[in-house]
């Protein structure tokens, strides 16, 4: 398939908040559709605006597995869309499985199928495939699809060695709609992805954030397979504790993220 450069319309003048990579200029977010994306002309985007207070973007909690000697090439995950937060005040909430480059921290290059609420002001849940390089200030996406509370989502990421192309595929089984991103290894800056992660990421007021969370009080990642096998040895990491954030590894392929919804 012939590579193509497809730029997202830069209708908004301000930076766009994206999962795993801070704020990025609209002209540096490229939508690939289901084509193999060639972003060879994006070196000019090698910068990022700083996070804006009082909204703070971080990984509220995550689990990760891997290390410098590990190379991740495949990941499957399923999860169910939670309720829409009852209170909205500009917050953004992301749940995603993903691969990180050399460290499981924000800013490192990441491949991720993302369940997102509040993205660019959307007060609904969407499912979207992403590649984000926050430190370079660029992002490449598949098409965002609308999903509803209770919908069962499936996703996979896979690297094809023969074509040297990554696929990030996100599907809503209730509607059959999917977000399909294919990007060459060269355009992910030829990096290896050394860590697999499951993440709850937020851009939210700290006062505390409990009233802005979904009422379900948990999201469970199931059917998790990494490099074609169940995962052992997840490392839990917490940034937020104000809303009883907790991680429970239910089995080798099931991890539950819990939190308290407290209206105010």
Image: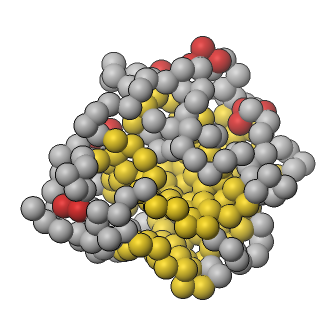
Quarter of the image where one finds residue 120: top left
Q: In terms of depth relative to the viewer, which is nearer, 49 or 74?
A: 49
Q: In terms of depth relative to the viewer, which is nearer, 36 or 220?
A: 220
Q: Is residue 28 left or right of residue 191?
A: left
Quarter of the figure with the C terminus: bottom left
- Does residue 195 show up? yes
> Which residue is farthest bottom?
251
Q: Is residue 96 left or right of residue 101?
A: left
- Does residue 155 show up? no
Quarter of the image where one finds residue 17: top left
x and y, in percent, of residue 193 in the image: 74, 49
x and y, in percent, of residue 80 in the image: 42, 72
Quarter of the figure with the N terminus: top right
The residue under the point 67% across, 34% down is: 37
> Which residue is farthest left?
264
Please say if 234 is above or below 59. below
The residue under the point 69% across, 56% down is: 195
The residue under the point 75% across, 52% down is: 194
Q: How many marks?
A: 0
The residue under the point 51% across, 38% down is: 21
x and y, in percent, of residue 248 in the image: 49, 79
Q: In terms of depth relative to the viewer, which is nearer, 141 or 6?
A: 141
Q: Is residue 11 left or right of residue 1?
A: left
Please say if 199 is above or below 128. below
């Amino acid at each position: 398939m012939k590579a193509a450069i497809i730029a997202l319309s830069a209708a908004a003048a301000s930076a766009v908040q994206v999962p795993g990579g801070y704020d990025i200029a609209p002209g540096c977010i490229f939508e690939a559709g289901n084509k193999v994306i060639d972003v060879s002309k994006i070196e000019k985007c090698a910068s990022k605006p700083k996070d804006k207070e009082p909204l703070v973007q971080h990984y509220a909690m995550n689990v990760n597995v891997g290390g410098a000697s590990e190379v991740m090439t495949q990941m499957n995950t399923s999860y169910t869309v939670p309720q829409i937060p009852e209170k909205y005040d500009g917050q953004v909430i992301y749940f995603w499985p993903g691969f990180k480059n050399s460290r499981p921290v924000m800013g490192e290059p990441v491949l991720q199928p993302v369940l997102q609420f509040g993205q660019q002001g959307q007060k609904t849940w969407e499912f979207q495939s992403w590649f984000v390089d926050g430190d370079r200030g660029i992002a490449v996406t598949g098409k965002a699809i609308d999903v509803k509370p209770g919908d069962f989502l499936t996703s996979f990421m896979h690297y094809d060695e023969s074509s040297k192309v990554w696929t990030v595929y996100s599907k809503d089984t209730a509607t059959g709609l999917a977000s399909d991103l294919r990007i060459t290894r060269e355009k992910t800056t030829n990096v290896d992805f050394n860590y697999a992660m499951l993440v709850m990421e937020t851009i939210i007021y700290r006062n505390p954030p409990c009233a802005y969370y979904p009422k379900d009080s948990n999201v469970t990642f199931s059917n998790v397979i990494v490099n074609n096998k169940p995962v052992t040895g997840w490392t839990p990491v917490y940034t937020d504790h104000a809303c009883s954030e907790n991680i429970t590894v239910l089995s080798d392929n099931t991890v539950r993220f819990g939190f308290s919804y407290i209206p105010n």
